[in-house]
Image (spheres, rainbow, N blue to C red):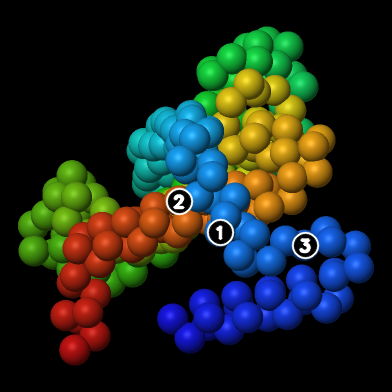
Amino acid sequence: MGSVVAGIALWWLLAATVFAAQGDLPTPPQVADAAVRLASSGELWRNVEPSLVRVLAGFLIGVAVAIPVGFLMGWYRLARGLMEPWIQFFRTIPPLALTPMVIIFVGIGESAKIFLIFLASFLSTVIATFQGVRSVELTLIKAARVLGAGDWTVFRRVAVPASLPYIFTGARIGLGSSWATLVAAELVAASSGLGHFMEISAQYYETADIVVAIIAIGLLGFVMDRVLLAVQARLTAWESTRAE
């Protein structure tokens, strides 16, 4: 809480001193007034909803596809040889660099935005999942086999639990990439959403409205990240037990 107060105080100080002459940086009260106005008129919610739906759809699909692909790559050498070069190739290409091609082949509808967000979350999560499987301690696998566990049991009871921290780390990174990709995609081709709203606000030099949209994105991303952390804590409770 103290860091939040300090951050707002620093923001207010900069707006009142360094940026006072230009008037480019709105003060916290100005942003608060803009937030109340936008929320009361419903304009903020009309733009939050499509952005949130796009991020959730693309992110969840990306993670859902990335986890089995990452396990296949980590568990089977043949799958790794077939998939890893392509994933490493596309991992070096920002999803936004594919925007022109996606618009040409998919159009500027919802599918294009969701596909770009899917790529952002998929590439981060698949690499983390693959690394998690490859990092499973060989001693644990050998011990399970000595006790008579088959491949499926070793995979389900050893590899999957040991990979969960890596998977959630990749998903959290993918979540941040998803929001960044969404805003940029909405700036390029969208008729709604927080990115589109910021573009329109910039045209009319409504800096307070832009800051409101930025804060909304930050808050939504923060809440989603906390949800991921809560799920991770529940599914990896064995980590704290082992540490004790």
Can residue 216 be spotted in the picture? yes
Residue 175, image x, y percentages: 49, 49
Query: Tag 3's secondary structure?
Result: loop
Task: Report which residue position mark 1 lands on.
Answer: 32
Look at label 1 and name its amino acid: Ala
User: What residue is pinned by disc 2?
Assistant: 220
Viewport quadrant of the N terminus:
bottom left
Q: Is residue 21 above or below residue 117?
A: below
Q: Is residue 2 left or right of residue 227?
A: right
Question: Answer yes or no: do the residues labelled 2 and 1 have beta carbons within 8 Å?
Answer: no
Estimate how packed mark 2 is, as few (under 14), some (14 to 19) or many (20 or more) residues with alpha carbons within 10 Å. some
Picture coordinates of residue 166 (x, y %)?
A: 41, 60
- Give above or below for 28 relative to 76: below
Question: Disc 2 or 3, which lies upstream in sequence?
Answer: 3
Residue at 39% across / 52% down in the picture? 224
Say whether disc 2 or disc 1 marks the residue closer to the N-terminus: 1
Residue 207, given in percent of the width and then of the height, sits at: 74, 50
Where residue 53 sits, quadrant-wise, is top left
What residue is shown at x 73% (from left), y 33% (from top)? 200
Left-right relation of 39 to 168 = right
The residue beneath circle 3 is: 25
Q: Earlier in the sequence, mark 3 or mark 1?
A: 3
Image quarter where the C terminus lies is bottom left
Q: Is label 2 in a helix, a strand or a loop?
A: helix
Q: Assign a secondary structure to mark 1.
A: helix
Q: Residue at x 27, y 62 (%)?
A: 230
